[in-house]
Amino acid sequence: GPTRHRRYCGVMAPSSRDRRQVRLRREYLYRRSLEGKEREVYEKKRKIREALSEGKAIPSELRGEEGELRRLLALDDASVQRSGPLALDDEYARTLRGERMAKICVTTSRSPSTRLKKFCKELKLFFPNATNVNRGNTTVADLVDATRRAEFSDVVVVHETRGKPDGLVISHLPVGPTTYFTITDCVLRHDVENKAPNFSVHDAPHLIFHNFDPTKRLATRLRTVLRCLFPAPKTLSGRNLENHKKRIVTFYNRDDTIALRHHHSHGDHLDELGPRFDLFPYQIKLGTLDDQATADVEWVLRPYLNSAKAIL
């Protein structure tokens, strides 16, 4: 049969889909390596510019490159800014430009409790274009493979401890990254103080990101990760665009903990829709969920370092 023709020396040959994923990953890593070199050049140009503006001597380690760096400094400032430290999120470029619609798969860790299943159903309603998938005995590798083939943009996995949601993982497809959060103070939609009004799950919300420092790489990165779980405003039209301002999702950075709140606007009055919970980021790894064991770490929280400096 066709499977036998794909075997060679007892090893299954990679399918065209597998080869495509390898190629996409290789191209992505190549782009990141270029970005790293561009950042290095950017830092060298910054040192040259500072020395020239302050009338100081050119740093000794840059004197051999001074002529080339001066030439680069004379080029368009836009290209210099593009190679700067905030030139992130290449994986999200198509979504940010509105060329790719956010399509979310929401699922759980294995053997979920009733409360975790309920929380996942509420997340499915929270994201405008989401599907709640019962995990069952599906492995991570099979889950990622199936969501790639179905052209999902992200996989959201919720974890729990003794029936209490306490972890959220967002894995961007097809090549990553994968972002890890701790969940605290989770209140489900039907547990909010006042009865939450009904709303259309198809209405894309207006997003508010408050107190995210735009000069910090991590704040910019996490804002993009969260923003790309929702449709870009430029892709909305008709009724969805009209209701875009009525449904509001707020991400409020408070001491490096992201408070998520969900409201419906009635003029100057806000009704809480729920769910509400707080997210605390602790790790970003390159790659998707199925290759986290060998993926490079982009950022990890190091709580044992004695530092009062805010990360967001």
Image (cartoon, grey):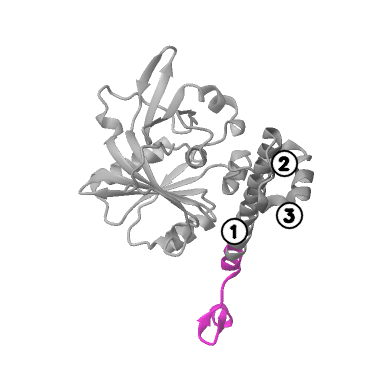
Q: Secondary structure at mark 3?
A: helix
Give residue 183's quadrant in the image: top left
Is residue 16 within the magenta segment?
yes
Q: Which mark is residue 29?
A: 1
Query: Percent x, y for residue 17?
Result: 58, 65
Q: Amino acid at mark 1?
A: Leu
Which one is in front in this view, the residue at disc 2 or the one at disc 1? 2
Query: Percent x, y for residue 179?
Result: 43, 48
Residue occupied by mark 2: 79
Q: Residues within 10 Å of mark 2 (few under 14, many from 20)?
A: few
Q: Which mark is residue 64?
A: 3
Mark 2 or mark 1, which has the lower sequence index?
1
Which residue shows up at 28% across the image and 36% down it?
A: 186
Quadrant of image for the N terminus: bottom right
Q: Secondary structure at mark 2?
A: helix
Q: Secondary structure at mark 1?
A: helix
Which one is in front in this view, the residue at disc 2 or the one at disc 3? 3
Query: Percent x, y for residue 214?
Result: 53, 33
Q: Amino acid at mark 3?
A: Gly
**How far is disc 1 from disc 3 in space, using C-alphas?**
30 Å
Marks 2 and 1 close (CB-CB < 8 Å): no
77, 202: nearer the viewer: 77
113, 294: nearer the viewer: 294
